Image: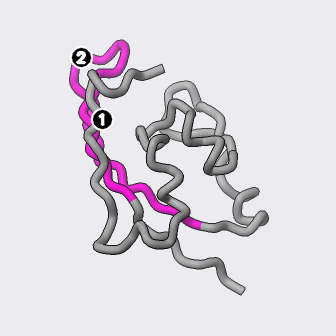
């Protein structure tokens, strides 16, 4: 049986400054929710390939992740990600990530 397809839940715009860089870091984040079987979870990369420090990928329950310093900054709305009615009307546009609202680790 195939897993359900991923669902776009949140969109977040980012323009922040990163330590050691002179230009603002600009990204648009599309945050999907997918329910993956264990064999697919095991196939996901063990580190963020585009992170300079190759930060490890860590799997935690949604409720535990809500309080973490996440990138993109979606912790406060993660409980909505697993609610079936949050896609009514399309994905939710989250407040922008800026140097005021989000600090790099």
From the viewer's perspective, tell me whether residue 68 is left or right of residue 11: right
Camera-nearest residue between 80 and 1? 80
Estimate the spatial distance between the alpha carbons at disc 1 and disc 2, rounded to whole Å.
18 Å
User: Of the residues tagged 1 and 2, which is closer to the observer?
Assistant: 1
From the viewer's perspective, tell me whether residue 59 is left or right of residue 4: right
Q: Which mark is residue 28?
A: none
Secondary structure at numbered mark 1: strand
Residue 65 placed where, x, y %? 60, 42
Magenta segment, prevailing SS (helix, strand or loop): strand
Residue 16 placed where, x, y %? 28, 27
Camera-nearest residue between 19 and 67? 67
Query: Residue at the bottom extreme?
Result: 1
The quadrant the N terminus occupies is: bottom right
At horizontal 31% and vertical 48% (from top left) the residue drawn is 94
Q: Which residues are magenta?
A: 10-34
Q: Which residue is mark 2?
A: 22
At horizontal 46% and vertical 61% (from top left) the residue drawn is 32
At horizontal 37% and vertical 57% (from top left) the residue drawn is 10
At horizontal 24% and vertical 16% (from top left) the residue drawn is 22
């Amino acid at each position: 049986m195939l897993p359900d397809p991923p669902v776009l839940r949140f969109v977040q715009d980012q323009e922040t400054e990163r330590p050691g860089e002179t230009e603002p870091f600009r990204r648009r984040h599309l945050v999907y929710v997918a329910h993956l079987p264990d064999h697919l979870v095991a196939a996901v990369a063990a580190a963020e390939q585009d992170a300079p420090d190759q930060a490890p990928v860590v799997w935690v329950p949604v409720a535990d992740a809500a309080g973490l310093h996440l990138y993109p900054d979606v912790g406060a709305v993660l409980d909505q990600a697993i609610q079936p009615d949050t896609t009514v009307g399309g994905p939710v546009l989250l407040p922008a990530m800026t140097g005021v609202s989000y600090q790099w680790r």
